[in-house]
């Protein structure tokens, strides 16, 4: 194994030296730059397993601009952000980086605790040696033509992840998550094809098969468990399709399913597009009795008035806040505020990304209604879900 590289970018030479020796001590290769522009000039082939510790505050080209440049590149290192500013600045920088699709390991406030820095590097080294099978790095990219064929051949299937009522512990619903059951490559996850579908005009067909399958599945399950709801993700493009409400109503009628059993999840950012048209469609869906959930709440830019205008029935707190709420005071404050806001607006509140009992306990204390996450179960195929309809969770 070659030594993993750690790029260090900081305008203070003393700091660079300190960090470099810390990197060497954990058996990794430090490559330091006091000028970010030198990094871009000198490093042409970036290994995606490499790490970059990046100071945000630099006189020549600051960390924010470095992230912007990285975002335009094919391969990028994984980032550790460093700043002498308060945590608020680091958090917004982290968010910005993620919005640019960069992998941010974490952010550290200066003065850097070297032990902590080294611990992160060692953990990261461990992770990259056991690259999980979801890693998309060495896999060939799928093409629009392949995806189109896959939809036609019914290779897109649904996995279901349980949603648990926090106060009773009972199964309250499931979220349908699409997977591509590829004949040679096995399961392909949505992060590899959703954007492609949106870009290449395949979203309508994709959503149709997803809604179709989930409605049929729900029709079977509703006899086994009363009040089991199914949630389906729809994209920005779907909520500008003026025929969606009618198509959906027909499908529900065909399957003799009450619209109240179905919830459509729309991300906050999807609303940003054609707001007037989306409002029209979402309102008509709601009038027909379909539930509407605002997904990834807290990561987008929807204003409170927008939230009030769209007749949402459910608010789904983004998992990034739930993950970190035990250690991070700000994340916890956001989760609490989302629960309060949702309840004030008469919405059910769901927390996703619940991975531990501690997460669940805190959510219960905060008064959140429903929880979803690996603590209970990952998403599973329909037949497995069927077997577990009456089990206790986790
Ligand atoms: P999402 O709607 O936010 O779905 C939640 C994602 O988080 C799922 O990933 C789920 O497997 C994962 N997850 C659930 N609990 C945990 C947990 O405790 N820890 C962690 N680390 N992750 C958890 P998945 O299935 O890979 O889906 C990714 C995204 O792809 C979804 O995010 C959604 O935006 C999109 N997507 C999935 N299915 C569909 C679909 O049928 N149509 C559309 N338009 N988008 C879909
Ligand atoms: Ca969702
Ligand atoms: Ca989500």
Image (cartoon, rainbow, N blue to C red):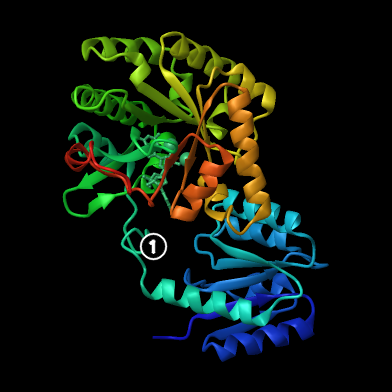
Position in image of residue 225 (x %, y %): 24, 27
Q: Quadrant of residue 81?
A: bottom right
| Residue located 24% across and 38% down the image | 156
The image quadrant where one finds the N terminus is: bottom left
Asked whether the viewer can see residue 87, the reply is yes
**Which residue sits furthest right?**
59
| Residue located 34% across and 58% down the image | 134
Given residues 205 and 368, the one toward you in this image is: 368
Q: Quadrant of residue 41?
A: bottom right
Position in image of residue 175 (x %, y %): 35, 35
| Residue located 43% across and 53% down the image | 355
Label 1: which residue?
137
Position in image of residue 328 (x %, y %): 64, 56
Disc 1 residue crowd, few under 14, some 14–19, many 20+, Cα 10 Å: few
Decide if residue 71 is on the left or right side of residue 387: right
> Considering only vertical position in the picture, is 73 above or below 309?
below
């Amino acid at each position: 194994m070659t030594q993993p590289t750690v790029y260090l970018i900081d305008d203070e030479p003393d700091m660079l030296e300190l960090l470099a020796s810390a990197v060497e001590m954990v058996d990794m290769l430090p490559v330091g730059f006091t000028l970010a522009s030198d990094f871009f000039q000198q490093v042409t082939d970036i290994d995606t397993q490499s790490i970059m510790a990046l100071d945000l505050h630099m006189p020549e080209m600051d960390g924010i601009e470095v992230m912007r440049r990285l975002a335009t590149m094919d391969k990028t290192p994984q980032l550790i952000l460093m700043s002498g500013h308060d945590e608020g600045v680091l958090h917004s920088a982290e968010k910005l980086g993620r919005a640019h699709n960069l992998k941010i390991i974490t952010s550290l406030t200066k003065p850097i605790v070297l032990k902590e820095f080294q611990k992160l590097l060692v953990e990261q080294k461990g992770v990259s040696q056991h690259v999980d099978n979801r890693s998309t790095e060495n896999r060939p990219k799928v093409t629009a033509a392949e995806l189109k064929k896959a939809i036609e051949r019914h290779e897109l299937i649904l996995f279901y992840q349980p949603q648990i009522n926090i106060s009773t512990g009972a199964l309250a619903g499931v979220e349908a998550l699409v997977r591509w059951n590829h004949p040679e490559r096995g399961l392909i996850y949505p992060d590899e094809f959703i954007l492609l579908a949106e870009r290449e005009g395949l979203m309508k067909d994709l959503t149709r098969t997803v809604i179709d399958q989930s409605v049929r599945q729900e029709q079977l399950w509703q006899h086994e468990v009363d009040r089991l709801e199914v949630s389906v993700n729809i994209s920005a493009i779907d909520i500008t399709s003026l025929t969606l409400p009618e198509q959906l109503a027909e499908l529900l009628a065909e399957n003799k399913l009450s619209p109240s059993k179905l919830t459509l999840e729309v991300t906050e950012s999807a609303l940003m597009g054609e707001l007037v048209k989306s409002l029209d469609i979402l309102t008509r869906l709601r009038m027909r009795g379909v539930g509407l959930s605002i997904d990834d709440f807290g990561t987008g830019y929807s204003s409170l008035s927008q939230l009030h205008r769209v007749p949402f029935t459910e608010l789904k707190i983004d998992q990034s806040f739930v993950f970190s709420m035990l250690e991070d005071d700000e994340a916890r404050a956001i989760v609490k505020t989302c629960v309060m806001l949702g309840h004030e607006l008469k919405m059910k509140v769901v927390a996703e990304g619940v991975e531990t009992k501690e997460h669940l306990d805190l959510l219960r204390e905060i008064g959140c209604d429903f929880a979803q996450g690996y603590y209970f179960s990952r998403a599973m195929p329909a037949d497995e879900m069927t077997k577990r309809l009456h089990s206790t969770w986790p």
